[in-house]
Image: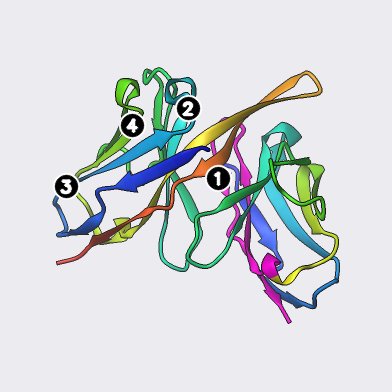
Amino acid sequence: EVELVESGGGLVQPGRSLRLSCAGSGFTFSSYEMNWVRQVSGKGLEWISFINHKGNSIYYADSVKGRFTISRDNAKNSLYLQMNSLRAEDTAIYYCVREGVSMVRGVMINGYFDHWGQGTLVTVSS
Amino acid sequence: EIVLTQSPGTLSLSPGERVTLSCRASQSVSSTFLAWYQQKPGQAPRLLIYGASNRATGIPDRFSGSGSGTDFTLTISRLEPEDCAVYYCHQYGGSTSFGQGTKLEIK
């Protein structure tokens, strides 16, 4: 069974840093692209970062570019999000998300989010 | 950036009814790159549909997806009480973005 378990969330002051981790199990972690998605309480979903399976292709949402860094350690089946210069508006639940891949009638479909962790809450407040 | 607009914002229906949720894109999206998720209170989102019309593993066949271009639909053929949730559409063709969600309440 695929499992993604986030950790590292908590209360942090504005301007400080926090590092989130995500441990994957039940699948070959090194074969899958991974993402971080966040959700402000009671609001919608916001994609914030992508990393390919090798770790050499990375993208960020404009809202976090230059402040957040995504990385992975395939030997440890782990995904990370280093968050610097945190702001109040970064307060949210952060989800670790795996991208799915399927062949449908000879066509490869990928990029959808097939497995989500339970999320870790980050609160930025003084 | 492709903006996804979902409608209605909220709807309330009775068990057994048929429901259709809409997702409209600001520009054309390949049907290969459209997904739907269900999120119940206190839980992470769960994948329902990918590639516009393909059910994810373990999803009941009362859930179906359709559409192309800028208009996509999630249909629940016979509402069950456990379908009470917020539903999000998601496009992942190049960039990625989510709709704002439709809240489905069961009477």
Tell me how far mark 2 sits from mark 3, CA to CA: 25 Å
Q: Which residue is mark 2?
A: A33
Disc sitting over residue B5 in the figure: none
Quadrant the N terminus of chain B occupies: top right
Q: Which residue is mark 3?
A: A17
Tell me how far mark 4 sits from mark 3, CA to CA: 19 Å
Q: Are marks 1 and 3 in contact (CB under 8 Å)?
A: no
* Disc number lying in front (2 or 4): 4
Residue A121 figure quarter: bottom left
**Amino acid type at mark 1:** Ser
Tell me how far mark 2 sits from mark 4, CA to CA: 12 Å
* Residue at the image position 53 percent from the left and 38 percent from the top: A1
* Residue at the image position 41 percent from the left and 61 percent from the top: A40
Q: Which residue is mark 1?
A: B97
Q: Secondary structure at mark 1?
A: strand
Which chain is home to disc 4?
A
- Please tell me whether residue B105 belongs to the stretch shown in magenta: yes
Disc sitting over residue A78 in the figure: 4
Q: Are marks 1 and 2 in contact (CB under 8 Å)?
A: no
Range drawn in magenta: B82-107
